[in-house]
Image (cartoon, rainbow, N blue to C red):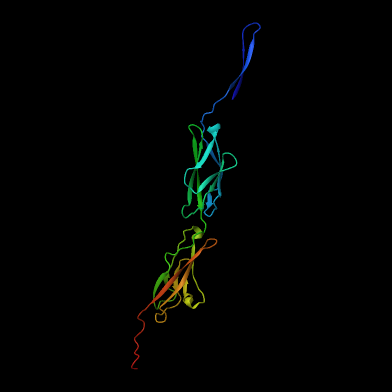
Amino acid sequence: TYKLDVQVSDKGQPPLTEDCRVIIKIIDINDNQPEIEVTSLSSVVAENSKPGTVISLISVTDKDSGLNGKVICSLKENVPFELKPSFQENMYSLVTKQSLDREMLSYYDITIAATDSGQPSLSSEKTLSIQVSDMNDNAPEFPQNPFSLYLPENNLPGVSIFCISAWDIDLNENSAISYHVVRDDTTRNEMANFINIKSDTGEILALKTFDFETMKTFQFKVVATDSGTPPLSSNATVNVFILDQNDNAPVILYPL
């Protein structure tokens, strides 16, 4: 708004004058796009974050006035995030809308759109990149359970007889797996004391020679444990079948 004081006068003697004020009002047109400003941003969010976790604070401004400066914000993609209006005008919080799963999707590009209410409306966009960090929420998995091992008798002690492996879909130390054989004092599991496993590779070694004529089958359990905090584990059963070899000569029982 501008105010001008105008005076007019004639050329008589004495001159007569008249004063007036002219008020000039500038009518706004919608010639400014909304501006989006990210005032804080957590570019990494843990996959176990609860719904409502604040990821970013966002403010929007529009230099126009009235409806031309009234701005509405929204997210363009169907993502597990949402915008929450603040008690301050044109302030928003970007928060998680639901639980995240890094193993399903580890990275999000979130596009924020700001549109004013002018005619025609003007809009602007800003994209935020959010990475989902891994948590140890998956136990190791074996490709099958149980395993079957067919072992010829008279094996050499200390020699590898089998290799077992598991995988973990988590990352880094959360997916680093170590193996061990379950041992206890029960008769059913006593043969596990004669089995060893390399903790880093899952290679299984027999610590004794097995004899088909004295034992034809037994089983033991292997546990795979990751290195996360807290660690998660799973187990698998290995059924061992001793295979007969021709290592005994015939014996004449009668007549002596």
- Seen as rendered, the residue at the extreme bottom is 256
**Residue at screen point 45% across, 70% down:** 237
User: Could you tell me residue 68's position as x and y percent?
Assistant: 53, 32
User: Could you tell me residue 242's position as x and y percent?
Assistant: 39, 76
Q: Quadrant of residue 19?
A: top right
- Seen as rendered, the residue at the extreme top is 13
Q: Is residue 19 left or right of residue 76?
A: right
Q: Is residue 77 left or right of residue 25?
A: left
In front of the other: 129 or 71:
71
**Residue at screen point 52% across, 40% down:** 73
User: Could you tell me residue 24's position as x and y percent?
Assistant: 58, 22
23 relative to 227, above or below: above
Q: Is residue 67 left or right of residue 206?
A: right
5 relative to 226, above or below: above
Whether residue 64 is visible to the viewer of this picture, yes or no, is no
**Residue at screen point 40% across, 71% down:** 148
